[in-house]
């Protein structure tokens, strides 16, 4: 049996770090953030939060962002130092979380905006979007 299939209850959020070649996920049933190398080895239980109901996950630089539906919070973890940094209470039950960064995807670079005028382009702030 693969290491990845063992001891997982409700994995809801998944994200891949292609540079580090790791898969990260949150387990709603266990209240954990875990990762594994893309080759199926080196599984790590990175963070555990008692009674958390993690749903969504995203990565940004050295940080992991995970939504908790039990307490309506967004958790921020430092994945390099394996440390919980901070959490924020949000106004409603959070589902997914996404990161937008103008340094990664320039405004107007998407073909879905053919009428976009780059002369009037303003740098987008680094923001989180909760849905």
Image (cartoon, helix red, strand yellow):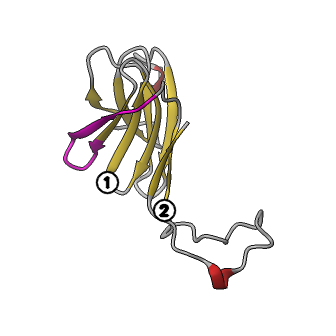
Chief SS of the magenta region: strand
The percent position of residue 13, horizontal first and vertical second, equals 50, 31
| Left/right of residue 53 with respect to residue 88 in the rendered view | right
Identify the residue under disc 1.
62
Q: Is residue 39 above or below residue 4?
A: below
Q: Quadrant of residue 48?
A: top left
Q: Looking at the image, which is closer to me, 44 or 73?
A: 73
How packed mark 2 is, by other alpha carbons closer than 10 Å (few <14, some 14-19, many 20 or more), is some
Q: Looking at the image, which is closer to me, 25 or 51?
A: 51
Query: Mark 1, mark 2: which one is toward the viewer?
Result: 2
Image quadrant holding the C terminus, namely top right
The percent position of residue 85, horizontal first and vertical second, equals 22, 42
Q: SS class of the residue under badge 2? A: loop
Spatial CA span between label 1 and label 2: 14 Å
Identify the residue under disc 2.
101
- Dot placed on the residue nearer the N-terminal end, 1 or 2: 1
As for residue 84 lying within the magenta part, the answer is: yes
Highlighted range, magenta: 77-91
For the point 36% across and 57% down, the residue is 61
Q: In this view, does 118 lie above or below 87?
A: below
How packed mark 1 is, by other alpha carbons closer than 10 Å (few <14, some 14-19, many 20 or more), is few
The percent position of residue 124, horizontal first and vertical second, equals 51, 67
As for residue 81 lying within the magenta part, the answer is: yes
């Amino acid at each position: 049996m693969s290491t990845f299939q063992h001891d997982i209850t409700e994995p809801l959020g998944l994200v891949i770090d292609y540079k580090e070649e790791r898969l990260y996920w949150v387990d709603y049933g266990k209240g954990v953030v875990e990762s594994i190398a893309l080759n199926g080895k080196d599984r790590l239980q990175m963070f555990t939060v008692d009674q958390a109901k993690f749903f969504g996950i995203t990565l940004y630089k050295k940080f992991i962002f995970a939504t908790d539906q039990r307490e309506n919070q967004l958790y921020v973890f430092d994945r390099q130092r394996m440390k919980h940094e901070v959490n924020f209470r949000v106004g409603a039950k959070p589902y997914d979380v996404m990161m937008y960064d103008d340094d990664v995807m320039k405004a107007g670079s998407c073909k879905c905006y053919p009428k976009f005028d780059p002369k009037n382009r303003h740098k987008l702030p680094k923001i989180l979007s909760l849905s």
